Image (spheres, rainbow, N blue to C red):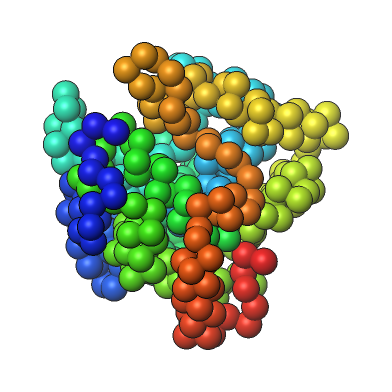
Amino acid sequence: MENYVHNADKLPVIFKHKLVDYQGVMLHEDYASMIPEVESLQCSNQDILLASFQKSGGTWMDSILTLITNNGDPDSLVQEEVRTGKYKPTFIIEFRWSSCPGRGDFKFLDLVKKIPPPKTMRTHLPYQLLPLELRRNNSKIIYVCRNVKDVMVSLYYHYMYHPSKIIDRLGTFEEFAEDFMKGAVADGPYFGHLHSYWTHRHDANVLFIAYEAMLKDHRGTVRKIATFLDKALSDAEIDNIVFHTSKDQMVANNDKTWRRYHTAKDANGVLLHQFIRTGMAGKWKSEFSDELSAETDAWIAENLQKYGFESNPFQ
């Protein structure tokens, strides 16, 4: 891939957008600058926040939420239809690009503030950095987690093919995994992020759900989320939501959504990567060596104990 150096010896992963330590959380410098504004965001108790660590199933859940809040209308997933104003868009509240080509200082939060309640928002921030008003007024929060080994693999390929090339040097997967376990990736450390929501999983306004559970019972997941949101749906509407949020349909409709900007092709136009890569659980097994898998298992066990998890959230 252009602008990447692979298989170099023991060089660090280098981010184009500087990572900074913000209250113990690694954030892109632009995103860190947004936290005071994020924390002061005015929120209604009708608003919904979808939270996840990167590449943990947030995009799938986003599609499900969009359809639930729009009674299963598939046009609500189509970017050009959303731009007409008929449907409310969903934005990542901390996203900022201070030098966006053609747009200057571009912040999603400026757009979020223009959307009347009820609205759905997204974030990759840990719980303690969420808007203060949202935490106080019992707004609905949905958190999606995923087997961290699958997260590591998916995030690696996301960085590899990201259109903005947010990584100057990616290196081998083994090198990336080592940095991930050190917490040297955006929104890390991973277990700190996970634990920040895990401690609120029994709150009445929080739904904590695993990606693997969504895969095992797609229809049941839709029902569970609708119930959590006090949204009455007919069987036909649920069937429609399940159909349009299947992996096959989401891949087929890729070019109608914002995900098309993450499509990568080679010089001959051959598809290399789409935002939705495998959509499966357990694909980490094809990427991890036995040695790396054992090292990661030890790291997982150490952090489950360190943060006081009573059980493994993604099993």
Residue at the spot 40% in from the left edge and 42% down from the top edge: 158
Say which quarter of the image contains residue 213: bottom right
Residue at the spot 56% in from the left edge and 51% down from the top edge: 286
Q: Is residue 142 left or right of residue 29?
A: right
Instruction: Please provide percent x and percent y for residue 7.
Output: 29, 50
Q: Residue furthest top?
A: 268
Split into 4 quadrants, where in the image is the C terminus?
Answer: bottom right
Is 9 drawn above or below residue 83 in the view shown? Answer: below
Residue at the spot 42% in from the left edge and 72% down from the top edge: 192
Is 86 drawn above or below residue 32 in the view shown? Answer: above
Is 174 drawn above or below residue 82 in the view shown? Answer: below
Split into 4 quadrants, where in the image is the N terminus?
Answer: top left
Say which quarter of the image contains residue 110: top left
Q: Is residue 203 left or right of residue 181?
A: right
Instruction: Please provide percent x and percent y for residue 23.
Output: 26, 72
Residue sitting nearer the eye, 304 or 60: 304
Residue sitting nearer the eye, 224 or 163: 163
